[in-house]
Amino acid sequence: MIPKVYIARPVPAEVEAYISQYCQFEKWNGPEPITRSQLLKQISDADGLLITGEKIDDEFLDHAPNLKAVSNISVGYNNYDLEAMKKRNVIGTNTPDVLDETVADLALALMLSAARRLPELDKLVKDGKWGSKGDEPLFGVDVHGKTLGIIGMGRIGESIARRGEFGFNMEILYHNRRRKPEVEETVGATYTSLEHLLRESDFVLLMVPYTPETKKLMGREQFALMKKSAIFINTSRGQTVDEKALIEALQNKEILAAGLDVFDQEPVAPDNPLLTMPNVVTLPHIGSATHQTRYDMAMLAAKNLVAAVTGREIVNVVPELKGLWPLKE
């Protein structure tokens, strides 16, 4: 019997063509992103589902009794209710690796933009306020030769560390759940405690997955440890930071600046104080947003999904759900 899958977001034609070789599929064709209520109406007979971040929980699974696998077009998977999926023997996959270098590029872009005040000064020029009183008020801070502290030395963290070390001659400190001697050898990174990293780093970059353990990992206590001249960069998830504490740290000049690709609420609320701070660079969660990387992510997600619903070995099952193999009939 040919598996049935539902594609809940637009994907390249090549991705659809790949899925069609192995599965029947239906897809969302609306002009706006599919809502949860609309999605629940579409999945009653689906064996597989291709999504980007919709919440998969008991309510959702009640509407999809045939579901065998959910494939996220994302490296993050905090949208998965892992216990609910385990209970129903539903596999969940993600798309690691393919976005590592692209997100690392963006992390360096945020560091440079915040340090050299690029958005602020771009606006100044375009507003016709580039005066003749000297350029000292426009000064930024150097990136090269400074200390970069990376919290979360996964694959993306390693890519960022290489750029910092070999591109900008930075000293690399890192804090991670476990020590990584191979990174220390190849990049010259130094493993240290979170407290020491925060005290010593000129740039603190957060690159951890969102889990119960990392929720609000950066809070008042952590920002208070940072140098007043330090710049905070977040390219992980908004919920890994106590956003109120970050706002207070910036308002009280406990830290110099910040570069943010993620927020606690997304899209960010228009009245969020971060949006009015000239020393904060704000981006709309675009870490992996290049044409090539998004294509690669969608194709990998499609391959994960096809493998799952056709009974083949799946490479990118999220760690917490690997024990569910083999799938239910």
Image (cartoon, rainbow, N blue to C red):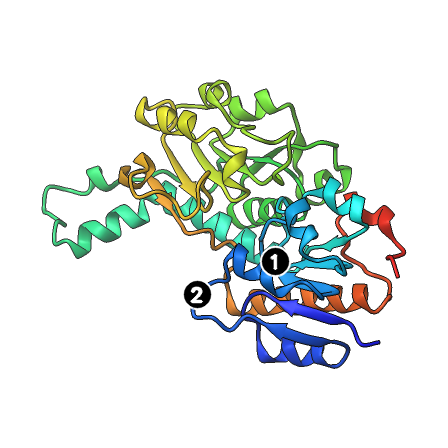
> 239 or 224, which lies in front?
239
Q: As rendered, which of 176 and 174 lies closer to the eye?
A: 176
Image-based side of 237 in relation to 76, left or right: left
Residue 302, percent across and down?
69, 68
Element type at mark 1? loop
Q: Of marks 1 and 2, which one's residue comes earlier in the chain? A: 2
Residue 248, horizontal then vertical, whole percent: 36, 24
Which residue is painted at 57% across and 75% down in the image? 12
Residue that label 2 marks: 32
> Around disc 2, counting alpha carbons within 10 Å, would you say few (fewer than 14), some (14 to 19), or many (20 or more)?
few
Q: Mark 1: few, some, or many residues within 10 Å (few <14, many ≥20)? A: many
Residue type indicated by callout 1: Leu
> For mark 1, what is the residue?
99
Q: Residue at x 28, y 37 (%)?
A: 277
Is 274 or 311 nearer to us in this picture?
A: 311
Query: Residue 62 appears at what percent x and percent y?
Result: 69, 51
Determine if residue 236 is in view.
yes
Q: Nearer the viewer, mark 1 or mark 2?
A: 2
- The kind of secondary structure element at disc 2 is loop
Q: Is residue 16 above or below residue 115?
A: below
Q: Are marks 1 and 2 in contact (CB under 8 Å)?
A: no
Q: Is residue 328 left or right of residue 67?
A: right
Q: Is residue 288 visible?
A: no
Which label sits on residue 189? none
Which residue does the image show at 62% across and 50% down from the upper left? Answer: 159
The C terminus sits in image quarter:
bottom right
- Is 325 on the left or on the right of 240, as rendered? right
Q: Nearer the viewer, residue 320 or 284?
A: 320
In three-dimensional space, the C-alpha distance between marks 1 and 2, rounded to whole angstroms, equals 25 Å
What's under tag 2, amino acid-wise?
Answer: Glu
Residue 197: x and y, percent?
A: 57, 26
